[in-house]
Image (cartoon, grey):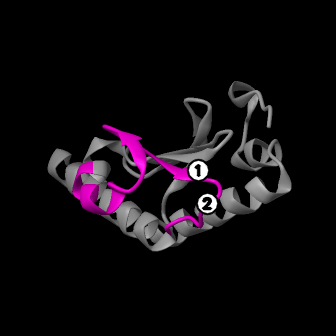
Amino acid sequence: MEITKTSSITIDEYISGFPSDVQVVLQTLRQTIHQAAPDAVEKISYGMPTFTLKGNLVHFGAFKTHIGFYPTPSGIEKFKDELAVYKGAKGSVQFPLDEPLPLDLVRRIVEFRVEENLAKAGKAS
């Protein structure tokens, strides 16, 4: 599963660099994020798929044994009890590739991040 992430220009190109089974997982994650944040904009940032809405919303990426999901430290903190079953760090979580993605949890995290970003943007106006 080799891909030069920094050379990816679009999320489609990023996803196409992985085996077909991983592509399905990535496309499902992408669709879930889109449904939770329909106004978000896609781009590649930090060499990985990124969604922005009044600032960075979430990032994700595929690795050898997991999908990395990066909803910022606030997204991890808000859902820390549900995320406790996964490896992670201050602003990230690892979803094992050999387990189904917790799509409902991802959706709720993204919805939280949308509300958070919109509230911050409203205060800045």
Indicate left or right for 20 with 60 as reference: right
Q: How far apart, in angstroms, are the residues tagged by discs 2 and 1?
A: 10 Å
Magenta part of the chain: 77-102
- Image quadrant assignment for residue 20: bottom right
Q: Residue at x 42, y 52 (%)?
A: 86
Q: Residue at x 74, y 54 (%)?
A: 22
> Mark 2 and 1 residues: CB-CB less than 8 Å, in contact?
no
Horizontal and vertical percent position of residue 57: 41, 49
Q: Residue at x 80, y 32 (%)?
A: 2
Give the amino acid at mark 2.
Answer: Arg
Query: Which residue is denoted by mark 1 in the rendering?
Result: 42
Which of the two labelled residues, at mark 2 and mark 1, occupies the earlier sequence position?
2
Q: Residue furthest left?
A: 123
Horizontal and vertical percent position of residue 13: 79, 44
Number of other residues with Cα within 10 Å of mark 2, as a class: few under 14, some 14 to 19, many 20 or more:
some
- Taking depth in this image into account, of 13 and 24 the one nearest to the observer is 24
- Image quadrant assignment for residue 43: top right
Residue 92 visible to the viewer? no
Residue 89 visible to the viewer? yes
Indicate left or right for 18 with 60 as reference: right
Horizontal and vertical percent position of residue 58: 45, 49
Task: Answer whether residue 89 is magenta in the image.
Answer: yes
Horizontal and vertical percent position of residue 124: 18, 45
Residue 30 badge? 2
Q: Is residue 25 above or below residue 59?
A: below
- Taking depth in this image into account, of 25 and 112 the one nearest to the observer is 25
Give the amino acid at mark 1.
Answer: Glu
Question: Tag 2, which secondary structure?
Answer: helix
Indicate left or right for 77 with 2 as reference: left
